[in-house]
Amino acid sequence: MYTGAQFKSELFNNLAKLLGSSRIRCTAYHPQANGMVERFHRQLKTALISHSSPNQWTEFLPLVMLGIQTSVKTDAQCSSEELVFGTTLKLLGGFINPNTNSQKLNLENYVDQLQDRMSKLKPLNTREKSSTIYVPKDLSNCTQVWIRCDKVKAPLSPPFECPFKVVPRKSKYFMIEKYGNTDSVSIDRLKPTYLDHELPYVWLDRLTDETITESTCKNNKSLQVTKTVRWAHPISQSRILTVLAAE
């Protein structure tokens, strides 16, 4: 579950003990877990909308959940309730329309068939997993990282948040100093930051004519004297100093 304050309260801990369950913490915006949850929510919403009165979705929710649990998955060739309980659930159709052509059950053959089938059972993967997962090699030794924004963003907003300092690292998540607090972030959302220590940071909106003259431009042969002069460093392409100089 997520690391929100409501999951750390004493009331929630006592409720978990009462139900006999344990609390497992994970990083927020975990891509794999969020993808599974979102796909199930999409299927659940589609089933609820198909009913005649979508506003009364609480009345149809038990029936919809029963249908989802008993439906056979195409990739695993079995249903969710078979994976959980090891058998199929008895639906109303099995009681209303019993099979009249069923033969008399032979208990000895049934036990032999049951033992043979149980010995051949093995866990099935519910979805094909990709074995190639790309992790930047510089992520293990970088001092600062970018964090991908997985929340709903405004149009034209940057996909990554500004670099944050990395504190103790774990195998699947990093501890990040973020806005005065320490937060755990999954490595799937991180991107290493490459700092250029050779060039200083220069923040200039506009340079006057007294700052760069025609003589300085002639002395520096790497600059081309035009109305708009661009000075690009060959190593760091993201750091471009644009100077407006008079002709």
Image (spheres, rainbow, N blue to C red):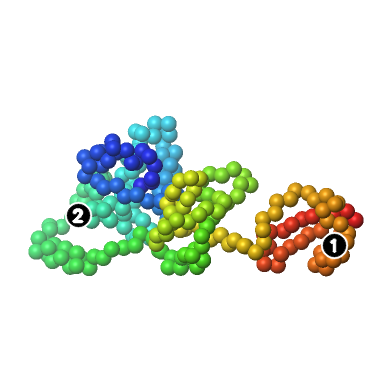
The spot of residue 86 in percent (x, y) is 23, 56
- Residue identifier under label 2: 101
* First in residue order: circle 1 vs circle 2: 2
Front disc: 1 or 2: 1
The spot of residue 236 in percent (x, y) is 66, 63
Left or right placement of residue 4 versus residue 13 in this view: right
Quick check: marks 1 and 2 in contact, CB under 8 Å?
no
Q: Quadrant of residue 202?
A: bottom right
Q: Nearer the viewer, residue 12 or 233?
A: 233
Compared with 168, 60 (above or below) is above
Q: How much space separates mark 1 and mark 2, taking CA atoms?
A: 98 Å
Left or right placement of residue 164 versus residue 39 in this view: right
Q: Is residue 200 visible?
A: yes
The spot of residue 226 in percent (x, y) is 86, 59
Q: For the residue marked with disc 2, what is the amino acid?
A: Asn
Residue name at image x 70 percent, y 51 percent: 203
- Residue identifier under label 1: 217
Left or right placement of residue 20 versus residue 35 in this view: left
